[in-house]
């Protein structure tokens, strides 16, 4: 079940992740994980179906809440899109069940790690009926991967 207390990041798309790390790091007194290059990253959108994208991402440290920066040539991550490229990331224990529950309440899936028919993958971006912001549901099965990333030696 969706629990706002399990929010672990506020994400934003940027045009240049390394420049954003420098600027936001200095302005907001943040340090960063190493930037991960995900190439390829399985992705699904209603417009393009299942496909792969290239994505760079990093998180601020320390936690428990993190700022996530994402850079990608994918139209989904365009800084001026979706509706404004910002989202919250929330851990969920059963992503397909939670996605279906929100869909039945009028939410729309804008992107996910796999198609709805294939269980949504390990993440899914949903827009509430009221619009205005996105919620990224992230499968709790990714917690060990994200925790290891956050605990790795200092990033750049």
Image: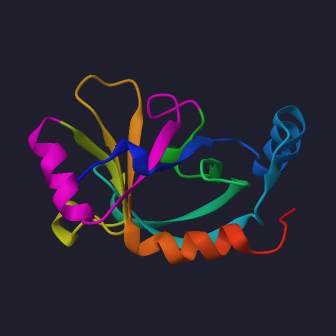
- Counting every numbered tag in the picture gives 0
Left or right, 66 with reference to 134: right
Q: Position of residue 86 (x, y in %)?
A: 53, 35
Q: Which residues are magenta?
A: 80-106
Residue occupying image coordinates x 48% and y 39%: 87
Residue occupying image coordinates x 64% and y 76%: 148
Is the image coloured rainbow, by chain, by secondary structure, or in one colour?
Answer: rainbow
Magenta-colored stretch includes residue 60 = no
Q: Position of residue 91 (x, y in %)?
A: 40, 58
Left or right, 43 with reference to 3: right
Q: Position of residue 29 (x, y in %)?
A: 86, 40
Left or right, 86 with reference to 61: left
Q: Nearer the viewer, residue 81 or 27?
A: 27
Quadrant in which the C terminus is drawn: bottom right
Q: Residue furthest left?
A: 104
Q: Position of residue 126 (x, y in %)?
A: 32, 43
- Please determine whether, in this image, residue 146 is positioned above or below residue 70: below
Residue occupying image coordinates x 53% and y 36%: 85
Answer with the quarter of the image where residue 119 lies.
Answer: bottom left
Left or right, 128 with reference to 80: left
Magenta-colored stretch includes residue 103 = yes
Residue occupying image coordinates x 32% and y 25%: 131
């Amino acid at each position: 079940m969706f629990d706002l207390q399990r929010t672990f990041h506020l994400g934003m798309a940027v045009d240049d992740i390394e420049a954003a790390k420098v600027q936001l790091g200095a302005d907001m007194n943040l340090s960063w994980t190493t930037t991960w290059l995900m190439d390829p990253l399985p992705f699904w959108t209603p417009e393009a179906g299942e496909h792969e994208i290239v994505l760079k991402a990093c998180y601020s440290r320390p936690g428990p809440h993190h700022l996530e920066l994402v850079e990608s040539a994918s139209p989904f991550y365009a800084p001026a899109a979706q509706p404004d490229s910002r989202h919250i990331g929330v851990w969920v224990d059963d992503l397909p069940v939670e996605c279906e529950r929100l869909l039945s309440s009028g939410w729309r899936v804008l992107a996910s790690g796999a198609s709805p028919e294939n269980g949504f993958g390990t993440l899914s971006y949903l827009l509430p009926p009221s619009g205005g912001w996105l919620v990224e549901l992230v499968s709790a099965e990714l917690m060990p991967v994200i925790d290891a990333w956050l605990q790795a030696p200092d990033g750049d």
